[in-house]
Image (spheres, helix red, strand yellow):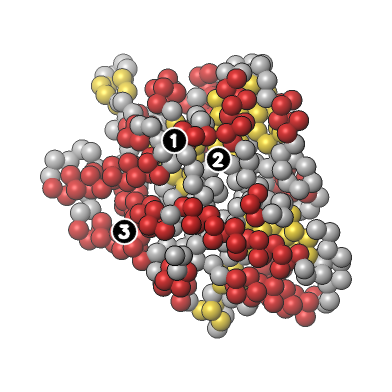
Amino acid sequence: MYDIEQIRRDFPILDRQVHGVPLVYLDNAATTQKPRSVIDALVHYYEHYNANIHRGLHTLAEEATAAYEATRLKAGRFINAEFPAEETIFTRNTTESINLVSNAWGRKFLKPGDEIVFTAMEHHSNLVPWQMIAQATGATLRYIEIDDEGKLIWDDVLAKIGAKTKIVAITQMSNVLGTINPIKAIAAIAHRYGAVVLVDGAQSVPHMPVDVRDLDCDFLAFSSHKMLGPTGVGVLYGKRDLLNAMDPFLGGGEMIMKVSYESSTYAALPNKFEAGTPNIADVIAFGAAIDYLEDIGMSAVREHEMAITQYAIDALSAVEGVTVYGPKDAHDKGGAVTFNYGEVHPHDLSQVLDQQGIAIRAGHHCAQPLMRRLGCVATARASFYIYNRNDEVDALVDGLGAADRIFGRVTTTARA
């Protein structure tokens, strides 16, 4: 049974008041809050076995190494990697994971005339690195269009992925629209042409069951801080053969086998891609976050989010002047509801809501091309996670009334 009140008691920050009223935290797509078990794991490391890993032979170093590598196995198994000890690479975030692939894979295997395919809904982190690598290699960028509901146009998928495609870089769940893309079907098409598939899982992995073997994706990138863990920890999953074929992304300590003044040989996976001292403490605390989510069960996480997301879509759509973007059926999307309210700028709306203790996101959400496709400069976004309740959606809707009182009655007819 999903006990949301018990879950909420595990998050100390939810007891906080903002401007004299209880916090309503609806900015989970940007970062999630942390349960006590994650905070405790971080503190416990620093208080009991703070040491550098892999290199030391003393007790503290061995304990830290064991805890760090245990999280690697947890993270790999969480997404059902076949070889979690080798196919799970720690980075700083999803952005760095994608840059690792664009550089270490792209510079080696892309050439002039090759095509990089992405979608019209990509976060800048899955667009800018490919623009940079296209300029460096002479490869060409192509993007798959979306329809007015924010879903991929399937005929365009079939038109854009072809014999020249070398990599398809695609989000599994849009951080703006919430759209869930059919990764398994797209991967099958890409593989038919010999292309590889990189999945931006920053929004999907924290919110739904993700199985890389079932999807048959070649790379998957995601972040700790969006799934109850600390900031500064990312994960790159890659198929072992592909990772072995790639050159290192960064050079330095830990990623080497043998070094001379003239040349070096590189360590085996995963060390080849983890140069220098890593973010040991936060990786270990990330392990506690994975434990917490697995105790709940990712299917239960998904069910809860579909329910509250549908409630939010329906409640916001019923407000005169609100435009909701993206799919309107929560089965087709994740827990992010993006909207605009009449002529009120999203930044102004966010500040008004903050005075009511309500935290949302406002801006272009690192997706400026998508904003232009939607015909707006910016949007407001409410995003939900395991601890959010329907009454917090009600508070959001009520908070729109404060915007009326400040900016005047919003009379624009809702377009969605």
382 and 53: which one is in front? 382
100 and 220: which one is in front? 220
Please provide percent x and percent y for residue 174.
Answer: 63, 47
Label 1, residues with CA under 10 Å away: few <14, some 14-19, many ≥20: many
Please indicate whether residue 401 sits to the left or right of residue 178 in the image. right
Query: What residue is shown with label 1?
Result: 237
Above or below, comparing residue 143 to residue 9 in the picture: above
Q: From the viewer's perspective, is the residue at label 3 or at label 1 nearer? A: 1
Residue extending farthest to the bottom is 20
> How far apart, in angstroms, are the residues tagged by discs 1 and 2?
11 Å
Secondary structure under badge 3?
helix
The residue drawn where x is 77% and y is 80% is 405
Label 2, residues with CA under 10 Å away: few <14, some 14-19, many ≥20: many
Residue extending farthest to the left is 58
Q: Give the mark, 1 or 2, whose residue is nearer the N terminus.
A: 2
Residue type indicated by callout 2: Asp
Residue type indicated by callout 1: Tyr
* Residue 42 - label: 3
Above or below, comparing residue 378 to residue 81 in the picture: below
Secondary structure under badge 1?
strand
> How far apart, in angstroms, are the residues tagged by discs 3 and 1?
24 Å
Secondary structure under badge 2?
strand
Q: Give the mark, 2 or 3, whose residue is nearer the N terminus.
A: 3
Above or below, comparing residue 21 to residue 111 in the picture: below
> How far apart, in angstroms, are the residues tagged by discs 2 and 3?
27 Å
Query: What residue is shown with label 2?
Result: 200
The residue drawn where x is 56% and y is 81% is 21
Residue 345 visible somewhere in the drawing: no
The residue drawn where x is 57% and y is 34% is 184
Residue 218 visible somewhere in the drawing: yes
Q: Quadrant of the C terminus?
A: bottom right
The residue drawn where x is 32% and y is 41% is 73
